Image (cartoon, helix red, strand yellow):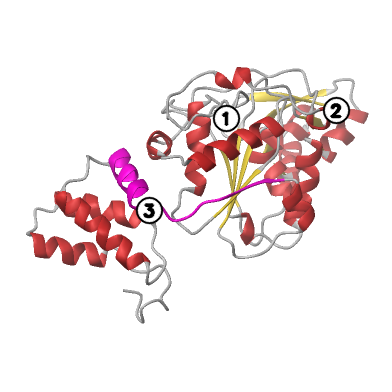
């Protein structure tokens, strides 16, 4: 591996992120005061067990290892494209676990998502109600009490180590979001206008606000946030739309393809017991069916698990497996099966 590589893809947690080369001069950030890294990615109180399992069992390809390291070294977002079920979102959890980046900050994109949703949420009505209920307590109306940072806003806090941010299915967004994201990720900073205004009328320049995924407040000075270690950002796309050239130019791009037999076998072994003859037969059937329509790897895993514990005879297991692997597109093979 190149000397600048810190991610190995071996699923063995280590502190290699501390050996990350210095950033290019045009991608160096100086936010502060520095914040300590969050808790361990395997902490059951911080991460759900299914995501820990996904991180531990992820099977990385040589290409994904190279491009993850490229994104880390260049301090650029990683745009991961590919068919459903190829492990695009799981990659973020695997990298965060191996490099001990803490719990993954996840932002699920819909057609209604805006940049503000990812940066912070502010509820002016709750502030107004609080001020009315406690007129004797001016602090009841403080802006920071009714504001919480979003996943993107939290990722850009001045942590000593990069945070991992998953922006899932960015291709579902409206036309403006990629360009809006581009500006924030290029500058590594943003402002919270409500806190900027409040700072003008207060001697206290730091506001204590809640960050995404934690109940521990962090200090935001004069309403401005600037990163210190650029986060490891994974943007996933199912290829449902094209992105502007300016957006693509600023991303490291990784295209995941459907796994071949050897990769499928490795994935099965990582999730379940080593494949036996029945599992090998089911992998063969999965690959044959994949030529006629869209299938996802987790369909194969579901079929392998359920047929393995069902206690059915061989013919019944095959029938059950067939029903658990319908095509994702209803137009494939006529009726979706």
Identify which residue is drawn at 64% across, 62% down: 111
- Looking at the image, the residue that sits furthest to the right is 200
- Looking at the image, the residue that sits furthest to the bottom is 334
Q: Within 10 angstroms of label 1, few (less than 14), some, or many (20 or more) residues?
A: few
306 vs 73, left or right, is left
The image quadrant that residue 183 belongs to is top right
Q: Which mark is residue 38?
A: none
Residue range (magenta): 251-271
Q: Within 10 angstroms of label 2, few (less than 14), some, or many (20 or more) residues?
A: many
Res. 141 visible in picture: no
Where disc 1 sits, the SS reads: loop
Looking at the image, is 69 positioned above or below residue 17? below
Of residue 78 and residue 311, the one placed in the foreground of this image is 78
Identify which residue is drawn at 78% across, 29% down: 24
158 vs 266, left or right, is right
Residue identified by numbered label 3: 260
Lower sequence index among marks 2 and 3: 2
Residue identified by numbered label 1: 214
113 vs 84, left or right, is right
Q: Which mark is residue 222?
A: 2
Lower sequence index among marks 1 and 3: 1
Where disc 3 sits, the SS reads: loop
């Amino acid at each position: 591996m190149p000397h600048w590589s810190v991610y190995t893809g071996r699923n063995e947690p280590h502190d290699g992120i501390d050996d990350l080369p210095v950033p290019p001069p045009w991608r160096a950030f100086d936010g502060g005061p520095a914040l300590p890294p969050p808790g361990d990615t395997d902490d059951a109180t911080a991460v759900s067990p299914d995501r820990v399992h996904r991180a531990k069992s992820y099977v990385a390809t040589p290409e994904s290892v190279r491009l993850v390291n490229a994104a880390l070294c260049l301090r650029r977002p990683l745009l991961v494209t590919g068919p459903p079920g190829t492990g695009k979102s799981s990659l973020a959890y695997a990298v965060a676990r191996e490099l001990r980046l803490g719990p993954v900050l996840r932002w699920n994109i819909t057609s209604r998502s805006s940049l503000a949703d990812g940066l912070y949420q502010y509820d002016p009505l709750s502030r107004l109600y609080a001020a009315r209920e406690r007129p004797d307590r001016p602090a009841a109306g403080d802006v920071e009490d009714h504001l919480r940072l979003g996943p993107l806003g939290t990722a850009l806090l001045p942590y000593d180590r990069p945070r991992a941010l998953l922006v899932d299915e960015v291709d579902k967004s409206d036309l403006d979001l990629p360009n809006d994201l581009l500006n924030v990720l290029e500058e590594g900073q943003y402002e919270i206008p409500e806190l900027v205004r409040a700072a003008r009328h207060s001697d206290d320049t730091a506001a204590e606000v809640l960050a995404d995924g934690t109940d521990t407040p962090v200090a935001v000075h004069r309403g401005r946030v600037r990163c210190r270690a650029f986060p490891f950002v994974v943007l996933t796309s199912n290829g449902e739309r094209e992105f502007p050239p300016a957006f693509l130019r600023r991303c490291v791009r990784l295209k995941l393809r459907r796994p071949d037999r050897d990769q499928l076998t490795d994935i099965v072994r990582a999730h379940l017991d080593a494949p036996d003859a029945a599992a090998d037969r089911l992998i063969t059937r999965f690959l044959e069916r994949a030529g006629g329509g869209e299938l996802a790897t987790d369909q194969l895993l579901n079929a392998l698990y359920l047929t393995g514990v069902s206690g059915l005879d061989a013919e019944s297991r095959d029938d059950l497996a067939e029903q658990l692997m319908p095509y994702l597109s209803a137009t494939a093979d006529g009726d979706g099966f």
